[in-house]
Image (tube, rainbow, N blue to C red):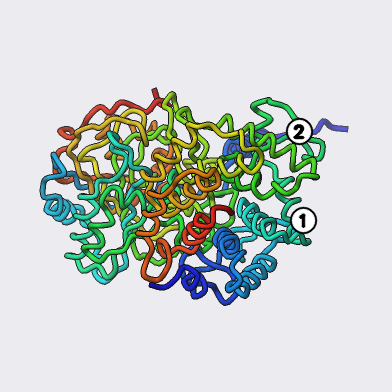
Amino acid sequence: MTSALDFLRTSQDTSGGWGYHPGHFPVTEATAAVLLALRDQTQAADLVESGLEWLRSTQHDDGGWGYVADDEESGWQTAWAVLAFSKMQIYDEYYRRGVEWLINVKPLGYRGDDFSNLSETQDTSDAIVNSWPWYPGEATWVEPTSLAILALVNEKNNQAAVTRSKHAVNYLQQRRCPGGGWNVGNPVMFDSALLGHAPQTALALLALLALDSGLYEERDLETLRYDMFIDGSPLALGLGCLVLRQLGSDCTDAANRILSMQKENGSWSNNCYHTAVVLMSERGNL
Amino acid sequence: MSKPQISRRTFLRWLALSGIGAGILVIHYNTRDVGLGNFLRWMLRAQVRRFNPASVVALGSCSSYQEDILSHLRSLWDQANMPDLSGKRVLIKTNMIDAIEGHPTVTNTRVVVALVDLLSELGVGEITVGEGSAFRRDTYAVAEAVGLIAELNARQVSFVDLNYDNPRPVPVKDGWLRRSTKLWLPESVLEADYIVSVPKMKTHHWTGVTLSLKNLFGLIPGSRYGWPKNMLHINSIQASILGIYTVVPPVLAVIDGIVGMEGDGPLFGTPVEHGVLVVSSDPVAADIICTGLMGFNYENIPHLSIAAWAGLWKSAHIETVGIDPASLTRKYRPPPSLQ
């Protein structure tokens, strides 16, 4: 069987980025995730370097990143790119501009001029309008909020980043599903309690753990352990294992199931993003 | 100096011109959200549709998923005068937001598989089944959970998670998506000659019903727009549904109402043993008829009443064939938002 690294090597676009599937246009999310997966593999140094170049070449003038190279709109993918630079400790101009974009992106309902004088409150509406949307001017949701917290976690001396992340933590606490964990961001719909889903629960837990190990609840982990098998995708199982390994919890069953799902070409789901998540889960960190 | 005089004719002329001017201003004000040009164009198109031959909607009775669904679909397909699909590329857009036990949230696998078999019989060149869940990150896992992947593998038909398909931008059309100039859509959608929208007949808390038009929301890639594709809700969910409909290849409708869903749809409604299958080459007409079969008035379902008003159906006349709609009509419990 071909290794996952070989799959990622052969799937890399000549431009340096990765699409979700081999032969597809490179996308920011998959490229950043593969860079995170390969960042400590010396035999992949050439892939990482050209992947970073792809990220640098696709950054917009406003500091953000879009879906693919020719998507002019900056959005949630910026958090992935900043996270990749941050984890590789590349604090260059591209990273800085990405951080500024993230700190200043305004969601639906935000009425201030900017976030430079953001104050700390426990107010519910403050938490909503200071968290992160998929795109500027839209409502805030769990996944872009979790990714932005992770991307800004090294900005400990940046007051705006720190304060906005605190509001975002408050938002995640509000958006927790009644049974624990998170879905896209709708814990209750017309009096019906919705269930948490593994991918969003894992990302929210990674964000909370990055800031403070005491912010999660046991019911979040129960939801994660349950839904990662209900979902059953390499993405859900991989992200689930990533969290459980960070917490030192056993994830043998999930790891075995993940292994059984590897394709002949070394991938999971023939998807570069999923394959990268599985590699990160084996390592136990982003 | 003599007093200026205005003749009666001049006065009436000015009065008429003022009336027309005031009328234009009122229409302009009331259509400012959509644009006067769009408003007039849609209104004119709707009038032109009055002269087209009637859209045919074929209604069939099928009491359970254990019946020979392929035979039912074959018969309805013939009755509905569906287009010749031989040699064409067809994307079957199934409806799989999430698999939740006890709630008929997704199009039944037997219906999708029977349609695949029918299209194979009809000599379709290439069949793909696709969906991009607005609620689950991985649609493939939902398709696997409901047994669809195994059935498709046995037929060597591929399933595409439209959330992760190759992205391409297309210009928006017809004035529906006014906040955007382009829409990113999956390659599998844009390269298809036809899309067959195969929804579950069910209620929906935001749009009233999920039928063949609302089902098109799943064509939009979450990897671009996020989950639950909220940007399009902000644009107005009704306008977005119609905006998607106008940029994608021609849409045909096959609607699974064998077991429908009433009440708190699209996720937590309860099953309705309805026993109906619907086929049409005009999805607007199909949805209007199905809304009636569910016991609702389409004029209370904004995206359908707007679609009809704006002439997005093929004809202002709808002819039903097959089973008499009166005998298939039920009274679905409405979603909480419409109660």
Q: How crowded is the residue under tag 2: few (<14 C-alpha within 10 Å), some, or many (20+)?
A: few
x, y percentage for residue B43? 46, 45
Callout 2 and callout 1 share a chain: no
Q: Image height check: is A138 above or below B93?
A: above
Task: Tell me how many marks there are.
Answer: 2
Judge left or right: residue B69 versus residue A57.
left
Q: Which residue is mark 2?
A: B5
Quadrant assignment, res B206? top left
Using the image as rendered, state which of residue B267 and residue B168 is in the foreground: B267
Using the image as rendered, state which of residue A106 and residue B295 is in the foreground: A106
Q: Quadrant of the N terminus of chain A?
A: bottom left
* SS for callout 1: helix
x, y percentage for residue A110? 70, 36
User: Label 1 sits on what residue type?
Assistant: Arg
Q: Residues under labels 2 and 1: Cα distance?
A: 75 Å
Q: Residue at x 61, y 47 (%)?
A: A147
